[in-house]
Amino acid sequence: MKKQVMGVTIECVQGDIAKQPDADAIVNAANAWLKPGGGVAGAIHRAAGPGLEEECRPLAPIKPGEAVITGGHNLPNRHVIHCLGPVYGVDKPEPKFLALCYTNALKLADEHKLTSIAFPAISTGIFGYPVQEAAKIAIQTVIDVIPTLDNVKLIRFVLYSPEDFKIHCDLLDQLVQ
């Protein structure tokens, strides 16, 4: 599923965030200490190799909504942008912090003159954010930030499960006519 907003392509694909060779940057749904973990963070750190954790160490800790950028190491991507999404029911206000993740990641990508970025469904795994609610915030935030971007021309949502993929596609179709 692909849609155009002001010359920027927003797309949803089903797959593995660590296997997006045509994206300049992938986004890590990170923990505060930017360490390998389960889910997205674990997959990205395993694929990137130990150099990623080493580069992350002095950048941690980060707060909910914050984003930092590192090299891609053994990934096919030039960069990894690490965002700390909110823990649902804990980090209030959750919608604000989740929107900040997408906003700050896009701003970092644009500042580094990157043309493409791939996002996972931030905070929807172990952090417990309901997928439907998180997807609506993610897609709406991306749409809202697009007019401020100079370099980013492709924004991809990479969804691991068929259910998450369908939710994101349906919302993208509703929000972008």
Image: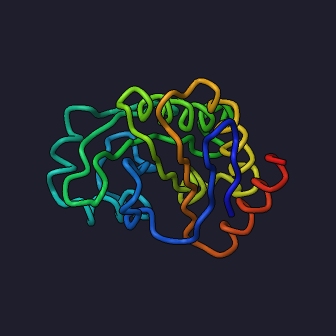
**Among all residues in the image, which is located at the extreme bottom?**
162
State the residue at coordinates (46%, 50%). 29
Can you say which quadrant of the picture contains the N terminus? bottom right
Tell me the colour scheme of the image: rainbow
For residue 134, above or below residue 159:
above
- Which residue occupies the foreground of this view, 172 or 90? 172
Residue 89 figure quarter? top right
- Which residue occupies the foreground of this view, 87 or 147? 147
Percent across and percent down for residue 35 are 29, 50
Total numbered circles: 0
Left or right of 28? Residue 86 is right
- Which residue occupies the foreground of this view, 121 or 146? 146
Left or right of 10? Residue 140 is right
Percent across and percent down for residue 104 are 50, 30
State the residue at coordinates (27%, 65%). 47
- Which residue occupies the foreground of this view, 47 or 75? 75
Residue 5 figure quarter? top right
State the residue at coordinates (46%, 30%). 66
Left or right of 75? Residue 2 is right
State the residue at coordinates (65%, 75%). 162
For residue 108, above or below residue 135:
above
Percent across and percent down for residue 78 are 28, 48
Percent across and percent down for residue 40 are 43, 60
